[in-house]
Amino acid sequence: MLQNKQQEIDFFDNLPSDEYNVFTDDANQKIIDTVLRCLALTSGGQIVDLGCGSGIFTQFLQKKGYACIGVDLSHKLLRIGKNQMNTVQFIQADVEALPFADNSVDAIMLSCLLHHLPNPFFCAKEVFRVLKPQGKFVAFDPNRLNPFMYLYRDRSSPFYSSKGVTPNERPVLPNELRNIFASVGFQVKSQFVDGLTYRYVASDTAKGLLPIYNLFERFFFKPFFLNQFRSFVFTIGQKPK
């Protein structure tokens, strides 16, 4: 199954807000800290932010001293990013056909992107193609093994809500992502992260439950034996020499 690109463009180009920033400031910082720790890239290195949206994470990375390029499908969100950060290059492009030469990119961040792809294989091939030898990528996505993510956002759940998501979206299974990226040549591992609390959700019903979810997210999944059930999974891969 392939991603319907126009559905993605239409959804994000018609968002009522002037930015797309769903996480709290603390969660955004935790995401960036985790990404940079996993990439272990020297300051000044190049990071391509795939699925950059309006550039929330691109801006964090730029302020940390990295040379950033933001890539997204949405014309509207890219325009917002360009207006906010004229020192960053933003490119409208498809992650399954990246506009970069082979072996040309230092590092890649996939910003909550892979769960928008019904088949991430084609994106994985492109990430492998454009990364330099020993280059790394880090992706973060909602984890289908987490009970809240499954119940609220997976189409097979009786409590699934489609409000605020595109028809392409589905939380990921960590082992499936590892296998896909390994199949194109990466050395891959997963890291599970808790404490990524939300600023808002689209569903009116879920809004009332958001404080409870955020409380659970901060504390309930901290024990090591619940590690794989944390709400977000970071998939980390390195290209061989």
Image (cartoon, rainbow, N blue to C red):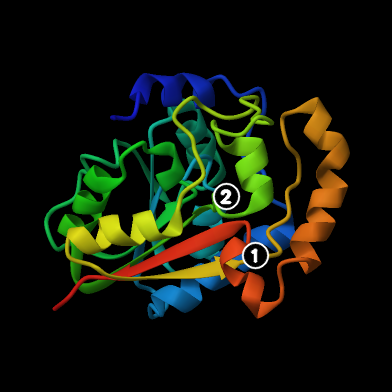
Q: Residue at x 25, y 55 (%)?
A: 127
Residue at 73% over, 62% down: 26
Judged left or right of residue 223, residue 239 is: left
Q: Position of residue 64 (x, y in %)?
A: 53, 70
Q: Nearer the viewer, residue 217 or 106?
A: 217
Question: For the residue carrying disc 2, how many other residues have a C-alpha within 10 Å: few (<14), some (14-19), or many (20+)?
Answer: some
Q: Mark 1: which amino acid? A: Gln
Going by the numbered disc 2, the residue's amino acid type is Ile
Q: Is residue 151 above or below residue 162?
A: below
**Quarter where residue 118 is shown:** top left
x and y, in percent, of residue 24 in the image: 73, 53
On-image quarter of the C terminus: bottom left
Q: Are marks 1 and 2 in contact (CB under 8 Å)?
A: no
What crowding class fits label 1: few (fewer than 14 Cα within 10 Å), some (14-19), or many (20 or more)?
A: some
* 236 vs 34, nearest the viewer: 236
Q: Quadrant of the N terminus?
A: top left
**From this viewpoint, is residue 128 visible?**
yes
Tell me the element at label 2: helix
21 w.r.t. 87: above or below: above
Helix or strand or loop: what does disc 1 sit on?
helix
Image-quadrant location for residue 235:
bottom left
Reading the chain from its start, which is encountered first: label 1 or label 2? Answer: 1
Q: Position of residue 172 (x, y in %)?
A: 46, 49
Residue at image position (51%, 41%) is 81
Q: Which dot marks residue 29?
A: 1
User: Where is residue 117 shown, x and y percent of the image?
Assistant: 37, 38
> Label 1, label 2: how many angstroms apart (C-alpha)?
10 Å
- Quickly name the residue at label 2: 56
Residue 206's disc is: none
